[in-house]
Image (cartoon, rainbow, N blue to C red):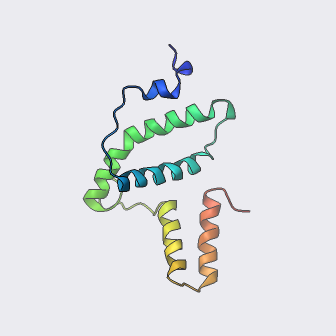
Amino acid sequence: MSRKNVSVSERLEGLTPPELNDDQLEVLDETLSSVEDMLSRFPVGRNCYSRFVADAFLQHVRVHLAVELQNIAAHDHRNDDAHDEPPPSIYARLVQLAEQVAAGNTEFEGLEHSAKTILEEIGQAE
């Protein structure tokens, strides 16, 4: 059977998920929801969109995620070189922006500039 004709349930057959508690499952669900939002902008034609994006993302995760999580545990960031700290991710910058607002930051121009910069980077600026 070609991969093209394999249903989602057939692709998941035989996979045994690890035992997760409710808190762990909630983190994974929130992460997946964020990834889905981000990947909805993936630049590819609509004809092969969902399968192509899912396969590309799964391959990327298989190659990079475990190593990057080990790097984070070892030296608090995802790069291999402890001295080569990457810039914060868009997610981290959004969290920081939300924390500033939640803390009562009233410097509107600074918040507005930060928000516009993030929106420009993700292609959502007007």
Percent x, y of residue 18: 31, 41
Q: Name the residue nearer the viewer: 37 or 27.
A: 27
**Residue 38 position (above or below residue 55):** below
| Front residue (pair 84, 32) | 32
Q: Going by the picture, which residue comes out furthest to the top?
A: 1
Tell me where residue 53 sits by quadrant.
top right
If the image is split into quadrants, where does the C terminus sit? bottom right
Count of number-bearing discs: 0
- 9 vs 122, left or right, is left
Q: Position of residue 87 (x, y in %)?
A: 45, 63
Q: In front here: 42 or 17?
A: 17
Residue drawn at (25%, 58%) of the image: 74
Report which quarter residue 43 is drawn in. top right
Q: Residue at x 57, y 46 (%)?
A: 39
Q: Quick check: 103 left or right of 122?
A: left
Task: Using the rendered image of the protein, determine whether residue 2 is visible from the camera's viewpoint.
Answer: yes
Q: Residue furthest right?
A: 126
Question: In the displayed image of the protein, which residue is found farthest to the left?
Answer: 74
**Residue 81 can be seen in this image:** no
Image quadrant of residue 27? bottom left
Position in image of residue 77 (x %, y %):
35, 59
Task: State whether residue 51 is above or below residue 88.
Answer: above
Q: Is residue 13 above or below residue 34?
A: above
Q: Residue at x 54, y 84 (%)?
A: 105
Decide: is 22 above or below 18: below
